Image (cartoon, rainbow, N blue to C red):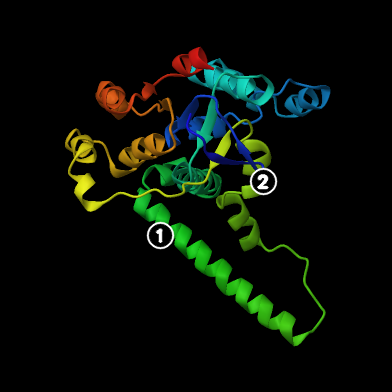
């Protein structure tokens, strides 16, 4: 890996190991398995006894092959020495935040209105609902601040329902740093440029082969950061993996088994 400044848990460090770029499809799976890499303890078992039917579902999900392998990746990156530096870019984080708000809203809505209602929702509708929640929360916050300004020195510590709803649907950066992104290195994208004349070269080929703009940006960022690997569960990457290696000498890893093989 070329010399690069990498931000991890608030510290700046330099790494010279080969780097593996996690795109959002891998990052989301990694985030979803948070906590499954930890050994069970007595309190876990006690909690599970109180929700025995949920534990049945947990065990079924844990047995799913991809989840088991991603949990193994988390264990390796969180607790063991590895031969690579797993990195995440701000682009992947933004896509994670988008997925998180949608998934959280669907889960809350299914509890409030039932799963049949959720199945009819489009992504755009969910975005409109989330906008309404944000606007209501913003108005409530402004009103609360006006009332507090009238009563100098008095601050309300009561948490409102809207605040709780926002906290559930808005991705928590503190949780991300300590738990969700544990084992990963978050990088700053410095000095990256995509000039007009260069768009018509390699990036246009990927667009022609039906890669979306986000996928193309992941490839260009992996190249910019000097990565030797790009990990993606998106099947579109398989279509261009040979070209990516030929052009940039970046190997596409498209399964948990391939990721584990190079760790």
Image quadrant in which you'd find residue 263: top right
Circle 1 sits in a helix, a strand or a loop, which is it?
Answer: helix
The structure residue drawn at horizontal position 72% and vertical position 83%, both measured from the top left corner, is 149
Q: Horizontally, is 48 left or right of 188 in the view?
A: right
Q: Name above or below for residue 135 compared with residue 247.
A: below
Circle 2 sits in a helix, a strand or a loop, which is it?
Answer: loop
Task: Farthest residue to the bottom: give it.
Answer: 150
- Of mark 2 and mark 1, the one earlier in the sequence is 2
Q: Horizontally, is 234 left or right of 225 in the view?
A: left
Q: Horizontally, is 71 left or right of 216 in the view?
A: right
Q: Name above or below for residue 131 compared with residue 113.
A: below
| Position of residue 16 measured from the top left corner of the image (x, y, whole percent) | 55, 28
Residue that mark 2 sits on = 10
Q: For this rendering, which residue is in front, 218 or 175?
A: 218
Task: Farthest residue to the front: give it.
Answer: 3
Q: Horizontally, is 10 left or right of 233 in the view?
A: right
The structure residue drawn at horizontal position 81% and vertical position 27%, both measured from the top left corner, is 43
Residue that mark 1 sits on = 128
| Position of residue 62 measured from the top left corner of the image (x, y, whole percent) | 58, 19
Image quadrant in which you'd find residue 8: top right
Label 1: how many residues lie within 10 Å, few (<14), some (14-19) or many (20+)? few
All told, the count of numbered labels is 2
Label 2: how many residues lie within 10 Å, few (<14), some (14-19) or many (20+)? few
The structure residue drawn at horizontal position 64% and vertical position 33%, both measured from the top left corner, is 182
Q: Name above or below for residue 102 compared with residue 2.
A: below
Q: For this rendering, which residue is in front, 99 or 227?
A: 227
Gap in Å between the C-alphas at discs 2 and 1? 34 Å
Q: Nearer the viewer, mark 2 or mark 1?
A: 2
| Position of residue 52 measured from the top left corner of the image (x, y, whole percent) | 69, 24
Q: Name above or below for residue 218 compared with residue 188.
A: above
Image quadrant in which you'd find residue 72: top right
The structure residue drawn at horizontal position 66% and vertical position 29%, both measured from the top left corner, is 35
């Amino acid at each position: 890996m070329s010399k690069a400044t990498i931000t991890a848990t608030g510290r700046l460090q330099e790494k010279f190991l080969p780097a593996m770029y996690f795109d959002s499809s891998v990052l989301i799976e990694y985030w979803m398995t948070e906590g499954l890499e930890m050994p069970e303890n007595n309190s876990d078992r006690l909690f599970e006894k109180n929700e025995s039917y949920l534990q049945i579902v947990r065990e079924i999900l844990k047995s799913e092959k991809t989840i088991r392998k991603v949990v193994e990746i988390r264990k390796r990156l969180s607790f063991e020495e590895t031969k690579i530096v797993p990195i995440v870019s701000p682009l992947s984080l933004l896509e994670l935040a988008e997925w998180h708000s949608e998934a959280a809203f669907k889960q809350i809505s299914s509890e409030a209105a039932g799963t049949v209602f959720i199945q009819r929702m489009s992504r755009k509708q969910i975005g409109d609902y989330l906008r309404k929640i944000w606007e209501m929360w913003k108005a409530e916050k402004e009103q609360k601040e006006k009332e507090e300004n009238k009563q100098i020195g008095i601050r309300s510590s009561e948490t409102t329902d809207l605040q709780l709803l926002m906290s559930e649907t808005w991705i928590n950066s503190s949780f991300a740093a300590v738990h969700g992104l544990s084992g990963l290195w978050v990088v700053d994208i410095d000095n990256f440029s995509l000039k007009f004349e260069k768009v018509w070269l390699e990036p246009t080929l990927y667009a022609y082969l039906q890669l979306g703009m986000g996928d193309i940006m992941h490839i260009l960022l992996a190249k910019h950061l000097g990565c030797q690997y790009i990990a993606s569960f998106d099947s579109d990457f398989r279509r261009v993996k040979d070209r990516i290696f030929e052009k940039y000498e970046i190997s596409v890893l498209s399964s948990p088994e391939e990721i584990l093989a190079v760790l």
